[in-house]
Image (cartoon, rainbow, N blue to C red):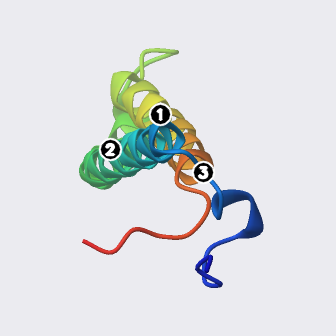
Amino acid sequence: MPNSLLPPEERNLTPAQVEALDKRRELGHTFLVIAGQFTVLAVVLLLWVGQDLSYSPGWLHPMAYYFAIAILLMTIFTLTGLVLRRGTPRID
């Protein structure tokens, strides 16, 4: 009898397909962890962004650029991780 808690597309998978599904979800979890690390980095960079934008001359705002890059990478890793982790969550 199939497990009714699983989505219909996951009820009749072969062992190889289950392994591929687990690897995909594990990679998604890894990406979410990396996104969390970039979130912490962005919060730390946020401490310097205001000062950098106020006192750096001209277009030289390295902390603002690093902050923007951290936010961009955080967004990319979060969205990719969420897409890869879709489906029934794994209980560890």
Closer to the observer: label 1 or label 2? 2
Question: Would you name the residue on which mark 3 appears?
Answer: 13
| Mark sitting earlier along the chain (2/3) | 3
**Picture quadrant of residue 28:** top left
Q: Name the kind of residue labelled 1 in the image.
A: Leu
Q: Nearer the viewer, residue 36 or 20?
A: 20
Residue found at x 46% / y 28%? 69
Q: Nearer the viewer, residue 2 or 66?
A: 2
Residue 73's place in the image compared with 81, above or below, is above
Residue 15 position, x and y percent, is 45, 44
Question: Within 10 Å of the Cα at label 1, are there few (<14), some (14-19), or many (20+) other Cα atoms?
Answer: some
Q: Nearer the viewer, residue 16 or 22?
A: 16
Residue 57 position, x and y percent, is 42, 19
Question: Would you name the residue on which mark 2 appears?
Answer: 30
Residue 30's place in the image compared with 89, above or below, is above
In the rendered image, the quadrant that contains the N terminus is bottom right
Under circle 2, the secondary element is helix
Q: CA distance from mark 2 to mark 3?
A: 24 Å
Closer to the observer: label 2 or label 3? 3
Question: Would you name the residue on which mark 1 appears?
Answer: 73
Q: Nearer the viewer, residue 70 or 22?
A: 22
Q: CA distance from mark 3 to mark 1?
A: 34 Å
